Image: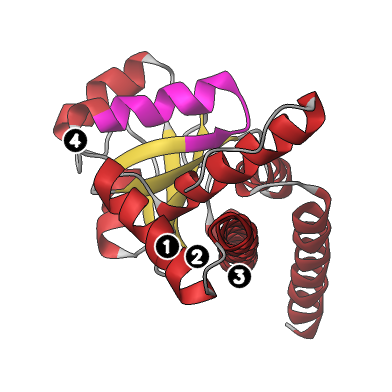
Amino acid sequence: MARHDHTATSTETAVRDTLQSLLLGTEDVEGFLQELAELAASVVSGQVHAGVTVSRDGHAMTVASSDAEAAQYDEVQYARGEGPCLTSLRTGETTIIGDLATDDQFPQYRLPALAMGIRSILSLPLDGGDQAVGALNLYSRRSHAFGERETAEAQRFADEASRALSLAVRLVQHVELTEQLRAAMTSRSVIDQAMGIIMGQNRCSAEEAFAVLRAASQHRNVKLRVVAQEIVTSVTDSAAGGGPPAARG
């Protein structure tokens, strides 16, 4: 028993290290999920196909798959509106089908899936935080491919993948926030430049210059930043061309 625990711990550590490396080595969440799906197919014992499903606005969609077959297997569930993947998404519980030939949990899904050669399925929930709720779907053409050992392997992987996915989502949110702050700073800089131009042209105060900008923005129904950028661009173009100063704001 001690050997089993040691092996499980070693496996968890290896998976955690690999997922962290993937997360650091990919540029976006989409790339990370693709790597995750391919890794899942190789980590779980036996020849399996892996897909990652994410729920967006109440609709399930495959965002990554280890191969084309896995994506097709997912689509069968979406088309029928039932299946282990959708059940895991809705309940947050692991769902397993030992043999589709005898398991009738999902009658609408069963026959089309069997026709595609699927015999056993294991779906595990992925929790990446409030912004990402998904499922890891493993498919096999062998019946009873996901026994106790394979299910434990998959569960350990899904647990580590959930933690990595949560971190990936936070990183993306941080990048988006940074970009928004950078955009806000750029806008503020442009507005300050435009105010300086108006103050120089009209010999007015900063408050009066801002009032001119705001009035132009409201009159034209465009953002303040857009009006400011037009003023700055006009003066810059005039200076470059040696023409007369821009019209007053």
SS class of the residue under badge 3?
helix
Q: Which residue is mark 1?
A: 131
- Does residue 182 lie above or below 8 as drawn? above
The residue segment tinted magenta is 63-78
Between 85 and 128, the one nearer to me in the picture: 128
Read off the residue under disc 4: 81
Where disc 4 sits, the SS reads: loop
Neighbor class of circle 4 (other Cα within 10 Å; few <14, some 14-19, many 20+) is some
Q: Earlier in the sequence, mark 1 or mark 3?
A: 1
Mark pair 1, 3: CA separation: 13 Å
Q: Residue at x 63, y 65 (%)?
A: 185
Name of the residue lying farthest toward the bottom: 2
Q: Amino acid at mark 4?
A: Gly
Q: Is residue 23 above or below residue 75?
A: below
Q: Are the residues flagged by discs 2 and 1 in contact, CB closer than 8 Å? A: yes
> Does residue 134 appear in the picture of this structure?
yes
Which residue lies under the disc numbered 2? 128
- Which tag, 4 or 3, sits closer to the chain's start? 4
Q: Residue type at mark 3? A: Arg
Q: Earlier in the sequence, mark 1 or mark 4?
A: 4
